[in-house]
Image: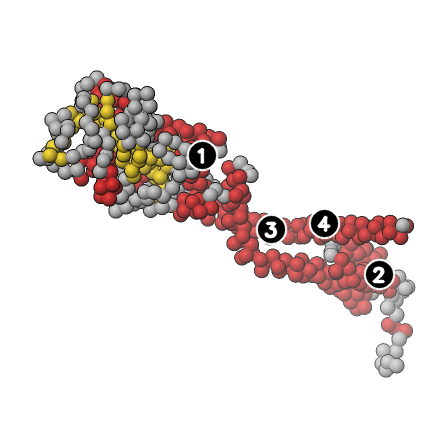
């Protein structure tokens, strides 16, 4: 038992001494190489800030008309960003085309925007990337008057089959509603258009309910206030796209949404039969210079806010690349395959981003700095050896002075110089691997001191026959 206890104590003592030795070597290493370490740190910080600058804390995002569904959606994104310590400032615009123009302008501070698919094409804009689709935007055509069974935008001699000579709102010019309505009308064959007016969504709702217009195109989400207001008005009807598959073939970015009978309002059986709607999608577009961390933040917001199950979308259906009519962001492609960086699940946004950036910079830097770091032990040993060598040189000079012209009256001065050499030797901090060289120096200093203390002639060369051959 005693032997085992003694073994444990000796083992602990050995580990303790080893740890103390390593710590002593480390502190000595810092004291001797701090200038080099500061230079390396400065290089690291420079590479870090240049190659991977920190993400901004303030981002501008274009939404749409004030009071619209995009503004409401933008507020949800702004709340999400605020929880992560980033300010997302919402910028009202007149619609999708203005959003695209502002993103394409390299001098405009806007970096993100909601835009409906089908409004822009890759050949029309540069410097814009897509983070994917985040929601369905059904193309609604509400009308008042007698309900038309199996209605569609059919053509008769260049006019609406059921809505000729009617006043129809097709949205403000430059808006997503206007772009979608024009495309639908064009491929439907309406070269001689009826009387069109260009109203915003809220104005179109008011005009339709006030019977100032007969119909209105509105491209917006199912739960948008404007859409819900019109769906709940029993005096209004919705056009069903019975040729939805044909529209989808001609405009591939369009999606077909199935609406079961009575699903809008079961009490009044609205719609009265199974219905097909056409829908575009809301795309999250960004300036291609946006910081990757902010892109990840937008994608995470889209997954949390738009990834929930809704009337038309399944849970987890968005964000996705359903209608990437603009180049896809590499960050979004990575997100689709790997989701958000792992560290974000365990650390706050800014800490996770800091760690990610450190890994990004440190790994390649360490690869480059490895040979230099490998040379540091040799560099330290050489420095310590140079200190010992310099003291050996000083000792040799003193000894040579004693041999060439010893003056007994200066004996005390010689001893003081030896004491100074010994003090300088004591001040040298060395690793245990160089202990033999260190104590050899100390021994040599003592040897010269002993010779000096022998008497009148410290080295006694005058008593020797220097011509005698050695034995």
Q: Say which label, 1 or 4, has the lower sequence index.
A: 4
Quadrant showing the C terminus: bottom right
Q: Nearer the viewer, mark 2 or mark 3?
A: 3
Q: Which quadrant of the figure has residue 98?
A: top left
Q: Say which label, 1 or 3, has the lower sequence index.
A: 3
Q: Say which label, 1 or 2, has the lower sequence index.
A: 1
Q: Circle 3 sits on which residue?
A: 37
Residue shown at the point (53%, 42%) measured from the top left: 343
Q: Are marks 1 and 2 in contact (CB under 8 Å)?
A: no
Report whether 334 appears left or right of 268.
right
Q: Circle 2 sits on which residue?
A: 446
> How many numbered tags mark residues here?
4
Q: Which quadrant of the figure has residue 115?
A: top left
Q: Which quadrant of the figure has residue 167?
A: top left
Whether 464 is drawn above or below 400: the answer is below
Q: Circle 4 sits on which residue?
A: 23
Q: Are marks 2 and 3 in contact (CB under 8 Å)?
A: no
Q: Circle 1 sits on which residue?
A: 304
**Regarding mark 3 in the picture, which secondary structure is present there?**
helix
- Expressed as whole percent of the image width and height from the top left, the position of residue 347 reads 55, 38
Q: Nearer the viewer, mark 1 or mark 4?
A: 1
In space, the residues marked 1 and 3 are separated at their CA atoms by: 44 Å
In space, the residues marked 3 and 4 are separated at their CA atoms by: 17 Å
Q: Nearer the viewer, residue 42 or 336?
A: 336
Q: Say which label, 2 or 3, has the lower sequence index.
A: 3
Report whether 364 appears left or right of 334.
right
- Expressed as whole percent of the image width and height from the top left, the position of residue 137 reads 31, 33
Q: Nearer the viewer, residue 46 or 290?
A: 290
């Amino acid at each position: 038992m005693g032997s085992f206890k003694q073994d444990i104590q000796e083992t602990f003592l050995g580990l303790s001494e080893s740890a103390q030795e390593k710590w002593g070597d480390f502190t000595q290493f810092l004291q001797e190489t701090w200038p080099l370490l500061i230079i390396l740190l400065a290089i690291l910080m420079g590479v870090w800030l240049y190659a991977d600058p920190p993400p901004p804390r303030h981002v501008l995002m274009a939404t749409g008309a004030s009071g619209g569904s995009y503004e409401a959606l933008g507020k949800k994104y702004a709340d999400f960003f605020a929880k992560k310590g980033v300010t997302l400032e919402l910028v009202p615009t007149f619609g999708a085309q203005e959003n695209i123009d502002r993103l394409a302008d390299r001098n405009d501070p806007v970096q993100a925007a909601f835009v409906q698919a089908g409004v822009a094409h890759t050949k029309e804009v540069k410097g814009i990337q897509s983070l994917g689709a985040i929601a369905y935007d059904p193309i609604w055509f509400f009308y008042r008057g007698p309900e038309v069974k199996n209605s569609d935008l059919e053509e008769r001699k260049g006019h609406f089959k059921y809505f000729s000579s009617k006043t129809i709102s097709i949205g403000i010019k430059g808006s997503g509603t206007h772009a979608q309505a024009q495309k639908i009308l064009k491929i439907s064959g309406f070269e001689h258009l009826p009387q069109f007016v260009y109203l915003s969504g809220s104005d179109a709702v008011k005009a339709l309910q006030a019977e100032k217009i007969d119909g209105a195109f509105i491209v917006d989400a199912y739960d948008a206030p404007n859409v819900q207001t019109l769906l709940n008005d029993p005096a209004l009807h919705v056009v069903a796209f019975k040729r939805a598959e044909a529209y989808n073939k001609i405009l591939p970015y369009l999606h077909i949404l199935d609406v079961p009978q009575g699903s809008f309002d079961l009490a009044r059986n609205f719609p009265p039969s199974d219905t097909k709607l056409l829908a575009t999608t809301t795309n999250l577009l960004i300036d291609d210079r946006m910081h990757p961390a902010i892109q990840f933040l937008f994608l995470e917001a889209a997954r949390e806010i738009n990834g929930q199950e809704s009337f038309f979308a399944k849970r987890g259906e968005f964000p996705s690349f359903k209608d990437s009519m603009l180049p896809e962001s590499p960050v979004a492609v990575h997100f689709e395959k790997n989701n958000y960086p792992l560290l974000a699940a365990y650390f706050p946004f800014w800490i996770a981003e800091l760690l990610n950036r450190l890994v990004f910079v440190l790994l390649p830097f360490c690869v480059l700095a490895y040979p230099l770091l490998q040379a540091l032990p040799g560099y330290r040993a050489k420095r310590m050896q140079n200190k010992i060598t310099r003291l050996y040189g000083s000792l040799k000079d003193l000894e040579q002075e004693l041999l060439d012209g010893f003056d007994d009256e200066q004996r005390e001065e010689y001893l003081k110089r030896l004491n100074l050499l010994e003090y300088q030797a004591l001040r040298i901090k060395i690793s245990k691997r160089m202990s033999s060289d260190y104590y050899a120096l100390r021994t040599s200093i003592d040897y010269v001191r002993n010779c000096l203390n022998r008497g009148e002639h410290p080295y006694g060369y005058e008593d020797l026959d220097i011509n005698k051959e050695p034995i």
